[in-house]
């Protein structure tokens, strides 16, 4: 089959990227450690929860776009 008979690949139209989360602050709660993080590239922010020191944090809020 040639490329004339295939559909084009879909490409994202936005300039999205994989966020590199940096921790701005943290504090302990009864459920684990809350991490207030922001992306070092685009300044998007969110809140993560780390329930155990060996477990990766998971997002508990939506991502809020930076300035």
Image: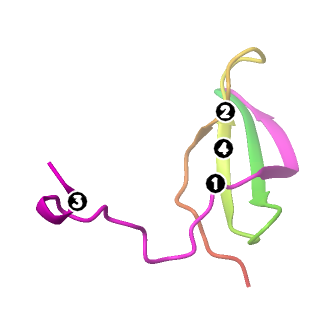
Q: Nearer the viewer, residue 34 or 55?
A: 55
- The single residue placed furthest to the front in the displayed view is 2
- Cα distance between the residues tagged 3 and 4: 44 Å
Q: Is residue 29 magenta?
A: yes
Q: Secondary structure at mark 3?
A: helix
**Residue sitting at x 74%, y 72%:** 42
- Does the CB distance between marks 4 and 2 fall below 8 Å? yes
Q: Earlier in the sequence, mark 1 or mark 3?
A: 3
- Cα distance between the residues tagged 4 and 2: 6 Å
- Cα distance between the residues tagged 1 and 3: 30 Å
User: Which quarter of the rendering shows the C terminus?
Assistant: bottom right
User: Nearer the viewer's eye, disc 3 or disc 4?
Assistant: 3
Q: Is residue 20 magenta?
A: yes
**Figure quadrant of residue 35:** top right
- Which residue is denoted by mark 2 in the rendering? 57
Q: Position of residue 34 (x, y in %)?
A: 73, 40
Badge number at residue 48:
4
- The single residue placed furthest to the right in the displayed view is 24
**Residue sitting at x 78%, y 18%:** 53
Which secondary structure class fits the magenta region best? Answer: loop
- Which residue is denoted by mark 3 in the rendering? 3
**Figure quadrant of residue 50:** top right
Q: Position of residue 17 (x, y in %)?
A: 62, 61
Q: What are the residue bounds of the magenta stretch?
A: 1-30
Q: Nearer the viewer, residue 28 or 5?
A: 5
- Cα distance between the residues tagged 1 and 4: 16 Å
- Which residue is denoted by mark 1 in the rendering? 18
User: Nearer the viewer's eye, disc 3 or disc 2?
Assistant: 3
User: Nearer the viewer's eye, disc 1 or disc 3?
Assistant: 3
């Amino acid at each position: 089959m040639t490329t004339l008979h295939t559909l084009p690949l879909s490409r994202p139209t936005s300039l999205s990227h994989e966020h590199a989360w940096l921790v701005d602050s943290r504090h302990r709660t009864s459920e684990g450690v809350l991490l207030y993080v922001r992306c070092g590239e685009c300044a998007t922010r969110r809140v993560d929860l780390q329930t155990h020191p060996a477990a990766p944090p998971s997002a508990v809020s939506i991502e809020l776009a930076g300035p």
